[in-house]
Image (cartoon, helix red, strand yellow):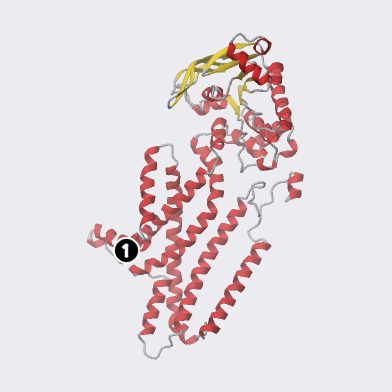
Amino acid sequence: MIRVVGVHKTFGPLHVLRGITLEVPKGEALVIIGPSGSGKSTLLRCINLLVEPDAGSVFIDGVHVNRPEVSAEWVRQQVGMVFQSFNLFTHLTALQNVMLGPVRVKGMEQEAARVKAKQLLARVGLAAKAEAYPAELSGGQQQRVAIARALAMDPKAMLFDEPTSALDPEYIREVLDVMTALAREGMTMIVVTHEMGFASNVASRIVFIDAGIVLEEGHPNQIFGNPQQERTRTFVSKILR
Amino acid sequence: MATEAATGQTVSRPGIVSLGSVVRVAETIVGAVLLILILQWVLEFEIADPRLWSIYWRPFTDGIVGSLGYIALILPVSVLMGFFLGWARISRFRVLAWPVATYVDFFRGVPPLVIVIFASLIGPSLMPERFQSRTLGLTLAALALAFHSAAYQAEIFRAGFQSVHRGQLEAAQALGLKPLQAMRHVVLPQAFRLSLPPLGNELAVLIKDTSLLSAIGAIDIFGLSQDVQQQLIFTPGSDLRWLFIIWTAVALVYFVMTYAMTTILAYLERRVRVRGLETMSI
């Protein structure tokens, strides 16, 4: 479903991605871990072209997407994204946030979009908050609306960029539950997270990224229980405490 | 408000006329009337003196019409220009940004009166003889005044755009919105909300700055009133306390025009208010 081949990205003097290659088959939930600054976020952004890769190729559903002939807007419709800081549109209600994409990008009728948005909000457990503005919602609620907003575009895959890192501890569970359900339903996902419980239970594979390269990848049991690389071992021991 | 949030009902938008706004307008009118009564008493004039108004009524009404005409031209032009210049300053096309920065620096550094006089001279002198007219000079001067204010408004809109968090644009892009759609549906509504209060300030200044056009002979309330003042001063036997009446009336006209504009903007501000993002009270 998603294939990344030899992707490089440089920001000024910073060589953030140094030839990343990974593949996510349809229906797989891949978890990416790695120290801060290792390029995890940049990698996700290269997949939906919020960041343009300097070199290498990104394939989505077999289509080579980082080419001038492919419009970035089209690519982003195929892959939903959830941000660490939620980024709900502050001037719109939860319902309007979820409706915006289908109406403006897909040209869906207002009424149809409203019905769909309500279903999605119900699915993330927020049917009662449809008319609330983001500033009236808790972090966990905002992030669940953000997931519904991304799902409203019927994406083929979902990217999660540290979706629980900005949350108070009591709200982390509800967001992870939504993500777990999504993975169980067979959504292809790439999740950057340090939630080890989620990673062990939901991920089919874990990729450890360090200094812009894939240092190690494998089943959660292997990465957490028996890492092969010294740096993976050090990192895992830190996050497992 | 609290019950609405709890029940999750649709937001109630304030109507055009709310009780609160009626009360505010009434307070202002009472205040203005009291101030005029006090001025009359202290300075010993009679605001409705029929002897003055028989001379002044015509220039007074012509002047109001003239001023409103200039405002109707200058205000929309300046807001449109200010908006697009402010946008240009944050444009991803960097080649647009620096000429605008120069433009802003230039107009901020020159007194509007100088700009008005300069524009009235330079415009007609570049045109062929048969197109030259008073109206042309005045129109160009009025536009120059709009350009001057547009420089300030560009900064207001730029600040509005820049106060929208970067993540808002990223989220819009991640949904597949094109840049113009992201601008229209995500960035602009938020930037507009934050730009309104300073914009009201600038437009109030601009309304009053139209009086500068009288320096080059515009038919406006300021210019015509000044003509009447000259006339009175050089008419033997005229009562010079009448001048207080004239300038009280002129001040009142500018006040009403400015107040009407700020009232409209205050209404817009209420319209775009977002629950949960109200300003704090301290």
Q: Quadrant of the C terminus of chain A?
A: top right
Residue at 59% across / 10% down in the picture?
A229
Q: Dot 1: within a 10 Å radius of its alpha carbon, few (fewer than 14), some, or many (20 or more) residues? A: some
Which of the chains bears the disc numbered 1? B
- The location of residue B181, given as percent across then percent down, is 52, 38
Name above or below for residue A26 compared with residue A41: above
User: Residue B18 placed where, x, y %?
Assistant: 66, 61
**Residue ID for mark 1:** B117
* Pick the front one: A228 or A33: A228
Give the SS element for disc 1. Answer: helix
Residue at the (53%, 61%) spot, across then down: B261
Q: Nearer the viewer, residue B94 or A75?
A: B94
Q: Quadrant of residue B230?
A: bottom left
Horizontally, residue A20 falls left or right of residue B117, namely right
For the N terminus of chain A, which image quadrant?
A: top right
Question: Visible in this render: residue A29?
Answer: no
In front of the other: A146 or A224: A224
Q: Is residue A40 above or below residue B27?
A: above
Residue located at (55% from left, 61% from top): B262
Q: Does B99 appear above or below B53?
A: above
Whether residue A115 is situated above or below residue A227 in the rendered picture: below
* Residue A198 in the image, given as x and y percentages of width and height: 70, 20
Residue lying at the far left in this picture: please name it. B129
Query: Viewer-proximal residue, A6 or B9?
Result: A6
The amino acid type of the residue labelled 1 equals Ile
Residue B265 visible to the viewer: yes
